[in-house]
Image (spheres, helix red, strand yellow):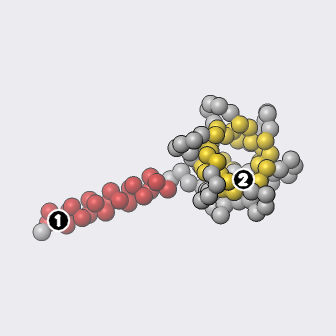
Amino acid sequence: MVKIGLFILNLFVLCFILTLIAFAGKVNKSDCTFKGKKLYGKVQVVTSFPDIKVQEVSSFPDLKVKKVSSFPDKCGKWKFVKSFPDFKVQFVTSFPDVKIQYVSSFPGVP
């Protein structure tokens, strides 16, 4: 009887730890950040050493992104630049940090 109780407790702890790991790198909805990096502003696309790895998707994004040419001052508004970025992204096809969907209106965290 004690062995079953310990097994269930260990199983519960393992599930809790795996849940924490799974959600550790997700977008913070309250302040629109990912690991302390704000998800709006001037963005530079790089092929190595990114701040965030992103994958473009057509459904179920972590962040809806609107490309802007000025005032990238709200969640999900990105102005693409060649230098002096607020953060750098690398586009990947698998294992992204953040999944994005380009939109023409209502950018931000869904």
Horizontal side of 102 relative to 17 (left or right) equals: right
Q: Indicate which disc residue 68 carries.
A: none
Residue at image location 44% in from the left, 56% down from the top: 20
Residue in the image at 42% along x and 58% along y: 19
Residue 28 point in image, percent of width and height: 61, 58
Q: Residue 57: x and y, percent?
A: 62, 51
- Given residues 94 and 97, the one toward you in this image is 94
Q: Position of residue 101 (x, y in %)?
A: 67, 54
Q: Which residue is mark 2?
A: 102
Q: In the displayed image of the protein, which residue is found farthest to the front?
A: 58
Instruction: Provide the residue designation for mark 1.
Output: 4
**Image quadrant where one finds the C terminus:** bottom right
Residue farthest toward the right in the current orientation of the protein: 70
Tell me residue 79's x, y (percent).
80, 45
Q: Which residue is at 60% across, 49% downward?
A: 98
Earlier in the chain: of badge 1 and badge 2, it is 1
Q: Check disc 1 and report its element: helix, strand or loop.
A: helix
Query: In the rendered image, is residue 10 in sight?
Result: yes
The image quarter containing residue 62 is bottom right
